[in-house]
Amino acid sequence: GSFRCFSLSHVFLCPGAGGWSPLSSDRYQWLEVDLGGRTQITAVATQGRYGSSDWLTAYLLMFSDTGHNWKQYRQEDNIGAFSGNSNADSVVQHKLQHPVIARFVRLIPLDWTPNGRIGLRLEAYGCPYNSDVVSFDGNSSLLYRLRPRPRQMTRESISLKFKTLKNAGTLLHAEGPNENSLSLQLEKGKLLLVLRKGNVMKLSSHLVSLGSLLDDQHWHQVAVEHHSNHLNLTVDKTNHGLSSLRSLESNKNFYGCLENLDYNGMNLVYLAKQRDQRVSMQGNVTFSCAEPIFVAMTFPSPQSFLWLPRVSEPSFKGMSVGLQFRTWNKAGLLLTFDLSNQGGAVWLYLSKAMLHLQIHKPGRAPLELTAGSALNDGQWHSVVLISRRGRLTITVDGDEGAIAHASPSFLIDAGQLFFGGCPTEESGQKCMNPFKAFQGCMCMLTVDNQEVDLFQVQKRLIGNYSHLQLDMCGIIDRCSPNHCEHGGSCSQSWSTFHCNCTSTSYSGATCHSSIYETSCEAYKHRGNTSDYYYIDVDGSGPIRPQLVYCNMTGKLTRVQPLPGKNQHLAHFEYTSEEEQLAAIISQSEHCQQELTYHCKNSRLFYTLDGSPLSWWLGGPGEGQVQTYWGGASPGSQRCACSIQGSCVDPKHHCNCDAAHTEWANDTGLLTHKENLPVRSLVLGDVQRLGSESAYRVGPLRCHGDKNVWNAAFFDKETSYLHFPTFHGELSADISFLFKTTSSSGVFLENLGIKDFIRIELTATEILFCFDVGNGPLEVGVKAGFPLNDNRWHRIRAERNVKEASLRLDELPAATREAPADGHIHLQLNSQLFIEVSASFKSGTSISYTFKEQVVKELNRSDSTLPSSLHPDMTLRAENITLSFRTSQSPALLLYVDSHQREYVALLLNNSKDAEILRSKVGNLSNGQLHNVAITRLADAVSVQVTQTHTLDLINALSHPTINQHSLCLSPDTGGLDQDLARLASLGFTGCLSAVLFNSVSPLKAALLHPDTSPVIVSGPLAQSVCGSASTNPHAAETKHHQSGQSGSVGTGQPLVNAIRSDSAVIGGTICCTSHCHSAIVISLQKLKQRKLKRCPDV
């Protein structure tokens, strides 16, 4: 059902209703708003229904100019869902990353409160939108004659918007002086910009291809900027530069609408509307956008299907069915039906991107026809099935396509038709699909030459459907832009894309990681022997791999004086490209190049006036003039013998400068990397009578790899290094070597407002953890043996838009696929660093206060994420981890409370009073290190102690939500109930480490950022290494393994410098030591309840 009621200025309330609530609460409801005219919409806000328990928790937004052919709003990361409300009263606003221009808005509920119904009040923000529009019918055009002819301009710009249902046509063609021209053309739904310069004999052509699926009858923004030899094309905020021209198909006139066509600030559509004399019209040109009725439907999932009854009675004359489809999948069922009154079935389906018709009839051989090819290219393709007078025909793409015939001996007729797939068996409808379900779009359905009214279908007045999106085509081109790197080719299906990395020298899901090592040193570390190897000096960077041999030799070159030339000039070429050469020199620890001059009565540098006779050029590019020889210092005009004190004539600084008539030589190594390699050599004393000489420039030899052996030693857990922010929005990789005797630790971590990355060691496993907005994810590789063996191990981690992977040494890589329609941008803003630790003594406590501003910064919408941490929203899940070492029992380790006086408490207790969940691990106050992991989702609680004992409790809570206010380690007694206050008065002495509440790390906040974090530290707080399993059990220090962030569960958002608070404590005072058996106890309750519900021991 639809509902029309709207106001741009305030939250609307329909009279007497308190908001919108449809009769049925399901995902087929929507709220549609007519703004009365095209409007630029910048934000939307929602509330629940007034005075009720009805509100939405997630929804989709759709936009349209006509009330048909809807387009779903997607953010930059292709996220479609918006998060809704947590109650009926609070307002949740979403600012649109890209303003939308539309007349109609449709909101589709995705999820709503489980204890109520769909309920909504809506507000939108925006302003009226005015534009100049012109419409073309495929036979019309506008011609602009710019008189007087504009002078030659250094910068030109063209911008426009267009919308069309045709995938080919010329939008614009411009001609200038010297036979220069520029064209904007549509070809197969892509926009091509063709730039031609010069006359026919000296034609220079360039081509830009950008965009995809532009024939969707929605507005697309185009901008062309031409400056000198630089040309840039932007389509819907994606840009591209020049590329070589390929052959173009014959083009057609444009059929569709143009809006705000602007040339160098001149609105050409406005000129045409004003009947400017510089504009002439041809054919039927109108100044409004003619909107054809276009109704499509999307089959997004394998459960999608459409069932239609046959309107006309089955006839001996036969039948016909027609449809158009577009898809990326090579296989899928388009249509199936049973043969009327005869038995048997007909399937029309795609297989290997070809159309197949298969008919099974009992007692007869199967009949199969095939037509068409490459039908999974995302373009619209038409299919017509006709059975008439004993002749069966299938036609693909009309006269321009393919056709197949058969003459079956039986009648082809149907009573009911199934498109895209079949209902479930529980529906009772007779339908069988032995093939894959169709995922894609369909339109223009006809049965017996009568078009199916999909609006009637949408209202369920005709047929039935499931998991279908009507009045829209939701196809997405996952290869535009192309995420395949280093020249990898992209192919796709409906839900994902694939990169073909063949012949790229790179591997991985997006061809990101080089298949070669970065240096000879890396090959050496693997145990390879001397040989030719390809090295990729910048790894996943843009520099191509090169074939090198690190132990090359050179030869002696005799100088042959040329008549009339006083100097001998030699230029040296290197097989590596310039950027490869520079990268090798920069990355190597040491580079050298031997320089030798054999001389007989031929000087090297010496002249009476001090100006050098000879010199060489070295360094980047063409090189800089150098006036020293191998073994000496730059600019010294000396040779190695001068440094060694061994020159044949002590009066000279080079052997050859003595100009003896016997052969001598000056040989030495050039080792200053900034002056390498040697580019050219100029010898100036080669023409004197009796002068002979020869030279040799040896190969460039580079040793070591600064990126391999740039080792750092961390002698205690409080050690850390800071690096600049790690940048890798769409793809990034990290590799390093490590060796350690510690059983656990964090290698590196980098945080953002919501995102983070972390690589850590846990016993025999390496974990790569990250969050790009879809919640924390991790990839782990288990070694099967201890990694704290003090031997070098190599870690390689990669994350891209398609997957994350982790490799340890030569073990098989572990991978984890990214959500198909999830967030893809990794946004970090802090320094890259290693973790820190803390310890607790008598009277020590840490209080961490949650802030509300985190909610305002959570502008990423994801209906799968729990609600944010702030006073007005409840949290249905917690993840708590920590490690502790103590000899004290009882003790209160951690306490989280809220404004609503709810709390979660972690107790070390030998009593059975006030418990909900108790461990049976044994004595935990034995001075040994113990690890605790607590997970609560709604009313299910799971506790793992020391990684070996797991306890689960279901339905333990009468109130399965927590409104976070604060988190405390070793709190004071104020505000606690009697039992907890007694434990808090005892305090805690010992070691707490790796404390994490969801993604909040209060220890790191207290130790690293006490002035900028929302923490309060009471008593002495010291750093130590007590969190290590190998540490003296009586030491006191914590070790942190998790990211110091907080926010909604799993979003990793820090709560620094925020506004309104809700709080949490860590810490301790020692009073006595208990020798009783102690266990972990989890306590969760509303404080206003005086007694906890007792549960049996687990």
Image: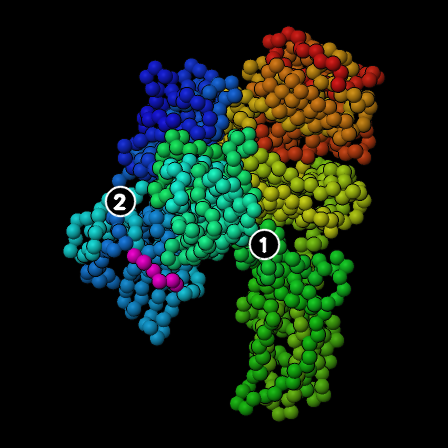
Decide if residue 778 is in sight here. Answer: yes
Mark 1 vs mark 2: which is more N-terminal?
Answer: 2
In the picture shown, does residue 1019 fall above or below 390?
above
Q: Which mark is residue 290?
A: 2
Q: Amino acid at mark 2?
A: Ala
Would you say 966 lies left or right of 889 here? left
Q: Quadrant of the C terminus?
A: top right
Q: Residue furthest right?
A: 1075
Q: Residues within 10 Å of mark 2 (few under 14, many from 20)?
A: some
Q: Secondary structure beneath disc 1?
A: loop
Coloring basis for residues? rainbow
Given this view, does label 1 or label 2 mark the residue nearer the observer?
2
In the picture shown, does residue 428 fall above or below 803?
above
- Residue at coordinates 46% horizontally, 20% vertically from top-left? 117
Q: Amino acid at mark 1?
A: Cys
Circle 1 residue: 511
Q: Nearer the viewer, residue 696 or 965?
A: 965
Tell me the magenta residue range. Answer: 248-253
Circle count: 2
Q: Are marks 1 and 2 in contact (CB under 8 Å)?
A: no
